[in-house]
Image (spheres, rainbow, N blue to C red):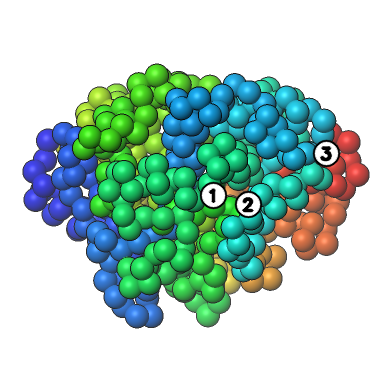
Amino acid sequence: MRTIQQIDDILSSSLEGQMNRNCIPGIAVGIVLDGKIAYTKGFGVKNIESGEPVTDESMFHSASISKTFVTASLMQLQERGLVDINEPVTVYIPYLKLKDERYKKITIKQMMSHLSGIPDVYDYEWEKPQYEEDALEKYVRSIFDFELLWEPGSGYSYSNLAYEVLGDVIAKASGMSFEAYVKNNILLPLGMKDSSFLIKEISVNNMTSPHILSLENGYHAAVSPYYPYNRIHGPSSTLWSNVRELCRYAIANLNRGSFEGFNLLNNDSYKMMWKPYAETNRKGTNMGLSWFMKQYKGVELIFHTGGDTGYTSNLVLVPEKNAALTFYCNCDYVNLFMLTEHILDIMLGLEVEPIAISATSEVARVLTTEGLEAASVRFDEIRSIHKDEYYISESEFNSLAYKFLKIKKAEEAISVLTMAIKEFPKAANLYDSLGEIYLENGEKEKSINSYKIALELDSSMSSSITALRSLGIEV
């Protein structure tokens, strides 16, 4: 294993280069070794306009890491006899109704493992956040027009919406708001005194700002006009924390619940949480109860990623090494998996390769400065000549297309997806996105054709199913 100084030297050098090359404003990293906090450090700035430095106490939006706190809360409530995760969710919130009558069969456990058939959230309404105590219940009552994707339990599809419903289950079973339950039963007992699901409880002085990629007037980071906060999406997304405090949570989970005299959960709960219930859309990755699991270079990782407007995050447990990694970025266009693996290699004493250059970033830079044709030529050069220096990410290209769409540049968005499909001709998600962008651009027939190709490649592509149904096409 490397010493802490060696870890810091390598990490500082590689991260600073990556941040400069890819316009990343700030990163915070926390590392647990031998079951103890070994390293916490901030890099870059909290806000590109103010220039305040990131520290290990800087507060970040955790995005979907939040879901692991939902699961921990439900398992606590089950241990206390207040919830049975094998029961239908309507036992606890009888006012839940969906358009498809099969919703009555959905169990809490199916929702925790993304096997409920409930579709995902398509609009988080960050631009018009709700703050009221009853916002979550009202939201759950409002989804009566949603259709299930399939028979509950018969297929995997990641659903933020399911976790909003689970947050309301926690509130009703515990007799307090979702946010209050997590604070009183998890955050404060673990010494996570600065962390909260309520943005009003976060110190303004410690908050980072969310950054998005600006594609107007060049290629650069810009502060997002909206914080990714809305109380109706609290359970799926809105934990605010820092790497120092998230390390405490990581240690508690490595210890199967035990931390400084507090018992988060018992061992039976961990056996249930960390058991694979489904294969996910990412090859080699299985789904437990909110936690993902996969093998990496001979060791098992138990983890949850996060990504929302302006933020990226990851929490990775390596139980057999009694180690963990936490990191936050205050931008939403970093390659999360590549960064994770790079830091894991450093902290676990493995061979460390240089971080490859993002082909997406290079295409975006050329496209915004030299135009569509030059970007296409540059992409072909990367694929044929410079592939060893660059990495080509399906998800990054997909995200870039939506960034162009957001600023009303549909032609550029379509061009980006067309490039990506050259590299990933069997990527159903790219065709699904192409279908959406064609539709936004008024090209209905091309949209339908793209959605159909997506379903030919992946019959479980829920957004394509929903889109085709809305266009009057039976699926």
Q: Which of 233/217 is in front?
A: 233
For the N terminus, the image quarter is top left
Q: Which mark is residue 278?
A: none
Tag 3 residue = 99
Q: Are marks 2 and 1 in contact (CB under 8 Å)?
A: yes
Q: Which of 275/104 is in front?
A: 104
- Residue at image position (54%, 74%) is 225
State the image coordinates of residue 86 (x, y, percent, origin top left): 59, 21
For the C terminus, the image quarter is top right
Count residues near mark 1 (Cα–Cα under 10 Å), then give few for <14, some for 14-19, many for 20+: many
Tag 2 residue = 136
Tag 1 residue = 177
- Residue at image position (70%, 65%) is 410
Could you tell me the amino acid type at mark 3?
A: Lys
Could you tell me the amino acid type at mark 1?
A: Ser
On the question of residue 323 being in view, the answer is no
Q: Which of 143/398 is in front?
A: 143
Q: Determine the secondary structure under disc 1.
A: loop
Q: Earlier in the sequence, mark 2 or mark 3?
A: 3
Q: Determine the secondary structure under disc 3.
A: loop
Q: Determine the secondary structure under disc 2.
A: helix
Q: CA distance from mark 2 to mark 3?
A: 19 Å
Q: Residue 466 vs residue 86: left or right? A: right
Could you tell me the amino acid type at mark 2?
A: Leu
Q: Which of labels 2 and 1 is toward the front? A: 1
